[in-house]
Image (cartoon, coloured by chain):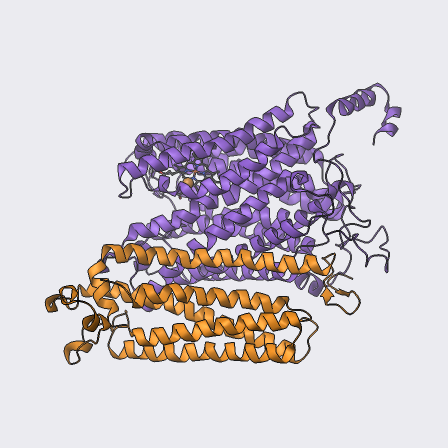
Chain colours: A purple, B orange
């Protein structure tokens, strides 16, 4: 790692107007690209489509629930609808969104590399992701899947819907994330620029590293578990089937052995995004760098020891339940450490409420609620009442939508100028961040209440308790607002890609290699000059920044002095 | 200029994202080990399932395993062990730059891999004939209505450890569970052998046509690592399935 960077760039000096976007315009150059930035964009398009499909399913669910008797869908179709929603959102969006879009785009830029360690493998991952997505879509076109995203046996082995096809799709998507994770690990280990030591890495990289470890260790387990369901269905074997003495609960153990860590696959990258945004818009070095870095690693490992909290009522012994409960409580500590550290980072900072910051602040509030309600579910005695109700639905939407999607949108808004070299309308950005926040709470807070009152999840009617209709209508109204909040960025960001104002290399005045040493958008090789890292990350100075700000107010002339 | 490799002197090719050949080689090795970690977890889950069931249905699993042909399994173990030695030599010769020796070793590995599959297919065939294939055709004990099961244990263990005749078969349902897992695990392992065959064949072809993709020993080392892993899985599968002690 000692040689200088970009020795081949001298042969063909890149001009300033060249970048990875206009390097080549043909469709083929996009579909066969090995440039990590272009692959990130390919993923961006793909996950947006899958998100849209998932969102349509969600809208149908919410519409159905506005009446205690159901309106539109039969029981079977309702089952397929919420299965579609869960499967698309979890496997084709949440698990992939931040790592594959922002991670692919940013990791080489942040560590000072020209590309991922294995660019062709990276492209292969995208094709596998698309193949998986297409198979899942095919399974829904051919009739759908009714076993929910959790695929519990024996329902999934006996169900006569397109489960095998769908599971094969998920299996392929799973291997696509495994290849992405292999790429991340090799890249972060071996491709760092000279001077980029482990403790100079942005926290974004630490969280992606932890995510990659979880993916590597967890995904194969769920892959094989789902594969066994396919084998049971396809070959008539019996591995979990109770008629043969097999144990359906074993399926749940294996499924949650992945799927609890999977929730951290979804949230850890968002943590990374938030660390970057909070420091930039508070203009302060991160508080407790090592605590945050190691808490990511701690989460990655502890996350493998708590799966039993999903199974308190699935024939676990009380002792088992207690142990899982205690470890879950311990696991909440590193998550809390992060929230405390971000808050402390903002203290005495020079805070700018730009769009990404609004998302980050929203993230902190919503993740807090999601995490704390997680503790209600982690305690056996309360969980006995709450499990299987809308309380859980609300909990995991607070962490997955309020956490991961807020982080994702914050990240997209933060790095948008870097990705496309243009800026979006800040006003629309702030408005839609607010709309998302309000709409989100309106959608999911009533679900806590109605869940606490006893509304079971996965039901499409509640004629036995029509008084719940009020909460459901609130929730549906909220989801409409939330939908608008998601649609708006889709519109003004797309507009900005083509018509936005040109952005300089560092429009936020942020620290980090991707801002300070690469253009917006970067050239194909990322950096024009050799990269050498001498500073710690987040070298912000709040006093300087606020002085600059005062001067700005006093006299516009002083703006020239701003770096 | 993206995607193009740049050569440094006459040494091996360095791809554009890497600084030098060391970085490139180390990255490949790190990537391969990371992938093998995944593979360990992949089979690990299956071993866990098997262990739990064997614990729960120990007697039936013991009786069911007696229908597996431990001699064929043993032969296959030997074949794979030998192939592992060969692939290790192939890596050695690759590092030394001795192409012919390397190709011969890879060829031997390839033959072993095919040998393994052939032996395995005889075993699978026999299981089918004895109606031990665990789907609707499964009919446990069909075979030894007319043949006595030959068991190494019957001849070699002290008499008090012999199985009583009345529990000769165990519960056919649990036995079907045993064979489900047996076929799944050995089947997946066989699939890995097939992937290994494809990898070794492509490697050999690339070496023979002097492809610019293969200019040093690292691709051989990666294939070697993978092949060792495939062997290792079998080293666990064989005793766990074929040599269950009472
Ligand atoms: C900080 C702490 C967290 C704690 C203590 C916690 C605790 C729990 C518990 C105990 C359950 C099981 C409830 C039951 O089935 O009875 C649960 C469910 C769930 N949690 Fe969390 N959780 C936390 C964070 C997260 C995060 C960050 C995510 C995702 C990004 C998440 C996603 C989920 C999901 C998806 C489920 C429901 C799965 C299902 O049954 O379909 N949780 N959580
Ligand atoms: Cu969990």
Is B175 rendered above or below residue A77? below
**Residue at the image position 59 percent from the left and 70 percent from the top:** B91
Q: Quadrant of ligand 2?
A: top left
| Quadrant showing the C terminus of chain A | top right
**Residue at the image position 81 percent from the left and 50 percent from the top:** A528
**Residue A302 at what x, y percent from top left?**
45, 40
**Residue A136 visible in the displayed image:** no
**Residue B5 at what x, y percent from top left?**
74, 65
Q: Quadrant of residue B123?
A: bottom left
**Residue A480 at what x, y percent from top left?**
51, 38
Is A428 rendered above or below residue A522? above
In the image: residue A221, left or right of residue B137:
right
Q: Residue furthest left?
A: B166
**Residue at the image position 60 percent from the left and 74 percent from the top:** B203
Q: Quadrant of residue A317?
A: top left
**Residue A47 visible in the displayed image:** yes
Judging depth in this view, the residue of A544 and B143 nearest the camera is B143
**Residue A264 at what x, y percent from top left?**
49, 42
In the image: residue B222, left or right of residue A552:
left
Judging depth in this view, the residue of A505 and B101 nearest the camera is B101
């Amino acid at each position: 790692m000692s040689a200088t960077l970009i020795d081949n760039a001298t042969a063909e000096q890149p001009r300033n107007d060249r970048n990875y976007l206009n390097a080549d315009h043909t469709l083929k150059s996009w579909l066969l690209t090995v440039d990590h930035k272009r692959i990130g964009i390919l993923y961006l398009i793909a996950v947006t489509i899958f998100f849209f499909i998932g969102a349509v399913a969600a809208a149908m669910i919410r519409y159905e629930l506005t009446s205690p008797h159901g309106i539109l869908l039969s029981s079977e179709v309702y089952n397929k609808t919420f299965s579609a929603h869960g499967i698309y959102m979890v496997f084709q969006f949440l698990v992939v969104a931040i790592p594959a879009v922002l991670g692919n785009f940013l990791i080489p830029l942040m560590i000072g590399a020209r590309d991922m360690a294995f660019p062709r493998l990276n492209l292969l991952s995208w094709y596998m992701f698309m193949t998986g997505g297409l198979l899942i879509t095919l399974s829904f076109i051919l009739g759908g899947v009714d076993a929910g995203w959790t695929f519990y046996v024996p329902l999934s082995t006996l169900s006569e819907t397109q489960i095998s096809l769908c599971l094969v799709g998920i299996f392929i998507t799973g291997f696509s994330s495994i290849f992405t994770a292999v790429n991340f690990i090799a890249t972060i280990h071996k491709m760092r620029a000279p001077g980029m030591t482990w403790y100079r890495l942005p926290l974004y990289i630490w969280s992606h590293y932890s995510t990659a470890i979880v993916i590597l260790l967890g995904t194969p387990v769920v892959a094989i578990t789902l594969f066994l369901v396919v084998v049971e269905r396809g070959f008539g074997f019996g591995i979990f089937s109770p008629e043969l003495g097999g144990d359906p609960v074993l399926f749940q153990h294996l499924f949650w052995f992945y799927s609890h860590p999977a929730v951290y696959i979804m949230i850890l990258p968002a943590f990374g995004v938030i660390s970057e945004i909070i420091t930039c818009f508070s203009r302060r070095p991160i508080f407790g760098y090592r605590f945050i870095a190691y808490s990511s690693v701690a989460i990655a490992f502890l996350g493998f020891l708590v799966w039993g909290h999903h199974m308190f009522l699935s024939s676990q012994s009380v002792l088992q339940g207690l142990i899982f409960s205690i470890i879950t409580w311990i696991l909440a500590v590193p998550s809390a450490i992060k929230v405390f550290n971000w808050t402390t980072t903002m203290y005495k900072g020079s805070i700018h409420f730009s769009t990404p910051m609004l998302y980050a602040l929203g993230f902190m509030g919503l993740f807090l609620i999601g995490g704390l309600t997680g503790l209600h579910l982690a305690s056996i005695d309360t969980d006995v009442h709450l499990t299987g109700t809308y309380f859980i639905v609300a909990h995991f939407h607070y962490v997955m939508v309020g956490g991961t999607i807020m982080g994702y949108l914050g990240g997209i808004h933060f790095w948008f100028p870097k990705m496309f070299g243009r800026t979006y309308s800040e006003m629309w950005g702030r408005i839609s961040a607010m709309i998302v926040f309000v709409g989100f709470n309106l959608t999911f807070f009533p679900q806590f209440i109605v869940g606490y009152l006893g509304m079971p999840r996965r039901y499409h009617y509640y004629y036995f308790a029509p008084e719940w209709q009020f909460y459901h209508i609130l929730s549906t109204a909220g989801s409409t607002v939330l939908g608008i909040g998601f649609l708006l960025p889709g519109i003004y960001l797309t507009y900005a890609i083509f018509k936005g104002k040109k952005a300089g290399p560092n429009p936020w005045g942020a620290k980090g290699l991707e801002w300070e040493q690469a253009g917006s958008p970067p050239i194909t090789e990322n950096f024009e000059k050799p990269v050498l890292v001498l500073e710690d990350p987040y070298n912000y100075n709040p006093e300087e920044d606020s002085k600059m700000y005062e001067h700005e107010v006093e006299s516009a002339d002083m703006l020239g002095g701003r770096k | 200029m993206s995607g193009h490799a740049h050569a440094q002197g006459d040494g091996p090719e360095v791809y554009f994202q890497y600084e030098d050949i060391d970085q490139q080689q180390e990255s490949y090795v790190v990537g391969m080990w990371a992938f093998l970690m995944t593979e360990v977890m992949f089979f690990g889950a299956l071993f866990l399932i098997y262990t739990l069931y064997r614990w729960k249905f120990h007697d039936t699993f013991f009786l069911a395993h007696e229908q597996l042909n431990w001699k064929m399994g043993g032969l296959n173990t030997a074949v794979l062990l030998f192939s592992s030695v060969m692939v290790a030599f192939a890596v050695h010769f690759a590092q030394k730059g001795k192409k012919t020796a390397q190709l011969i070793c890879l060829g031997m590995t390839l033959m072993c891999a095919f040998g393994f599959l052939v032996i395995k297919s005889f075993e699978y065939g026999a299981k089918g004939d004895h109606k031990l294939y665990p789907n609707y055709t499964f009919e446990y004990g069909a075979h030894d209505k007319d043949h006595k099961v030959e068991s190494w244990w019957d001849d070699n263990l002290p008499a008090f450890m012999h199985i009583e005749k009345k529990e000769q078969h165990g519960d056919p349902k649990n036995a079907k569970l045993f064979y489900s897992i047996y076929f799944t695990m050995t089947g997946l392992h066989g699939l890995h052998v097939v992937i290994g065959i494809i990898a070794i064949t492509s490697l050999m072809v690339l070496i023979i046509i002097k492809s610019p993709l293969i200019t040093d020993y690292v691709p051989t080392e990666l294939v070697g690592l993978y092949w060792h892993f495939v062997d290792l899985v079998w080293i666990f599968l064989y005793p766990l399935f074929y040599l269950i002690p009472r």
